[in-house]
Image: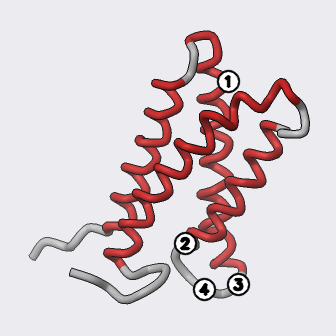
Amino acid sequence: MMEQESATALGVGIGLWLFFAWIWLTGKRERRWPLVAAFGIVCVAALGVGFAAPWLTGGGGASSLAAIAGGAVACVGIVQPWKNEGRWMLDHLVPGGIAGLSVARVGCLFDGCDFGRVTS
């Protein structure tokens, strides 16, 4: 019998690719690689905190709210929005990150891992 795959993992994977594609397609040629580097740091922080927070509190799985917090802290640390030279990154990181997160949350909805019950 075949085991059912996790919709959460599928949602996170598609969400990450959507986030990356947004950054790559909307970034100007000379600014693409700094955006890709920022994307990587934000994603690592989001996934790290998303998995670490439930583990530290005795739960299991991942928390999308902790992932948002980790990604937001990393984004503010990289962009430093109080300085004018880094604000252009926000124009690319925020919409792409929100779009990617929304797709990942659809996977969580189908698995019932964050809020609600498992749906068919």
Identity, as a three-letter code, of the amino acid under mark 4: Gly
Residue at image coords 40%, 57%: 103
Numbered disc 1: secondary structure? helix
- Choose the circle earlier in sequence order: 1 or 2: 1
- Choose the circle earlier in sequence order: 3 or 2: 3
Res. 11 mark:
none
Residue at image coords 62%, 44%: 94
For the residues bearing labels 3 and 1, Cβ distance under 8 angstroms: no
- Choose the circle earlier in sequence order: 4 or 1: 1
For the residues bearing labels 4 and 3, Cβ distance under 8 angstroms: yes
Mark 1 or 2: in front is 1
Front residue of 94 and 78 = 94
Q: CA distance from mark 1 to mark 2?
A: 28 Å
Q: CA distance from mark 4 to mark 1?
A: 35 Å
- Choose the circle earlier in sequence order: 3 or 1: 1
Q: CA distance from mark 4 to mark 3?
A: 6 Å
Q: CA distance from mark 3 to mark 1?
A: 34 Å
- Residue named by callout 3: 57
Q: Alpha-carbon neighbours of circle 4 within 10 Å: few (<14), some, or many (≥20)?
A: few
Q: Alpha-carbon neighbours of circle 2 within 10 Å: few (<14), some, or many (≥20)?
A: many
- Residue named by callout 4: 59
Residue 80: percent from left, percent from top: 85, 39
| Rendered image quadrant of residue 56 | bottom right
For the residues bearing labels 2 and 4, Cβ distance under 8 angstroms: no
Res. 34 mark:
1
